[in-house]
Image (cartoon, grey):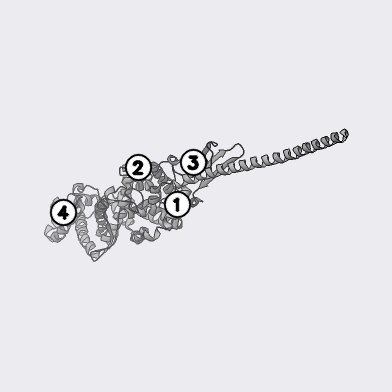
Amino acid sequence: MRRNLKNRKYRYGASSVFLAIILSAVILVECTFLAFVWELDYITKVNNAVDAQVESIMCEYDRRLFDVYGVYAFTKTVVDDDVYRSALLACGYKEGPQLDLAGYRKIDTKAFKDAIGMYYSYRATGIALIQVADVFSEMIGELIDSDVLKKIKEYTSSPAAGYVTEIIQGAEKISSWFEKAGEKLKIDDFKKELGLFDTLKKQLEGGDNDLKDLSFNISIKDMKPAIGLFEGLIDLHEKLGNTSFKLASHIYEANYFSYNFDCFLKQDIDSSINGTDFSSMHSKNKSDSEYILTGLTGNAAIAAVNFLLMQVLTGTNFLKDYTDKEYRTKVDAVSKVISAIIAAVSEGSVEIDYRIITVALIVLIATFKAGRDIQTLGKGERVALYEKNGKKIVTAGYRDFLFLFMQAVPDNLMLERGLLVLRRDFGELYTGITASADTGIKKISVTRSYALYG
């Protein structure tokens, strides 16, 4: 009897040990599973927190930069880990791994180019992309066809150049030239022409306009500057004719940098394409468009643009006067007098075709008119490029000329210089970022950049 009880007690103990072994395995499996679930949940929450932080940073793009320039970008001033910490805390984690913010993606010329393309894709209908270059094409073609350079060079290489200079600069004493000519010329025979000569002299001195203080002191016998003006025009025309400058993207960029950046014009009469005052970007007036065009800064950039303006405006005014038959007839009359005086004073040793003198005089007058036009443009007003029957058919403002000149600037130079201006006003700009956190189990890394830049 005792033996049976003893055997039964032993049997029950074996079952308990067996169950304990089985349950310990189950508990081990369950605990491992729970630990895995907890770790997975922790990793997920950290990943979500990192992702939320990166998205928050990307949403903090500079609104003004986007509104005015169409550029999505942020600066380091908006970078922190506040959203990351708040997201972990909301999930019940007071502490979390250190957030590492790095891998900043700076905006480059390619991204800038993409931004400009997008900027015009939704603004093009509201922006008049006037092809100012086309307006000048016919004018420059006429300069080439009329062989103006040859005529001017022919004039400057002749002895007549010195005589013409002395006659023009000393126009108030022109009677003394008739005295030098002696009996060969009589002043009474040229009274009408001398009246035209006085009118011409007033034009050269600026008449009653703002150029009065310039007075006439340009030597007409040295027309190298004028020749340089025309050669510069022709060179620009050839560059614009190159197919590589006819791409839509290049035209967009030229328009963008000509009309959407601060320039020489005073801020109270000038603004960006969408009407934003440049004073909200920087307190002092900046010649940013001129810098992007020339690569020069300050007064040097303005002087370079004025030189280009002088080229184009001199050519424009020359053609307007040269193709005006009535006006050219009057100048021809003056040229004939000058030619006759030169022939008489030199006793026939120096003779010059009056038509060559006409070209020289019209160029000179056109140069002074160009100076007057530059002053008009500087006031924010427009000048006439083409007139008919006294009406201004085609006009252009200062920025229209910048657009013309900008056509000849390579894309990479415009983009690089434009980015420097934006960095000056807005700081270092970034289009993407990488954030990472090491949970000890797995390293979480999230990279984001604006879809606009690919």
**Mark 4, residues whose alpha carbon is within 10 Å: few (<14), some, or many (≥20)?**
some
Mark 4 → mark 1, Cα distance in angstroms: 71 Å
Q: Which residue is mark 1?
A: 115
Farthest-out residue, front: 1
Name above or below for residue 108 compared with residue 96.
below
Q: Quadrant of residue 426?
A: top left
Residue bearing the label numbered 4: 181
Q: Earlier in the sequence, mark 2 or mark 3?
A: 3
Question: Earlier along the polypeptide chain: callout 4 or callout 3?
Answer: 3
Question: Residue 336 vs residue 446: left or right?
Answer: left
C-alpha separation, residue under disc 1 versus residue under disc 3: 33 Å
Residue 105's x, y, as percent?
50, 43
Identify residue for label 3: 86
Residue type, mark 3 in image: Ser
Give the spatial CA distance, label 4 vs label 3.
99 Å
Amino acid at dot 4: Ala
Residues tagged 1 and 2 counted as in contact (Cβ below 8 A): no
- Amino acid type at image mark 2: Thr
Tell me if 164 is positioned left or right of 136 in this view.
left
Q: Amino acid at mark 1?
A: Ala
Q: Nearer the viewer, residue 358 or 214?
A: 214
Label 2 and label 3: CA atoms lie apart by 47 Å
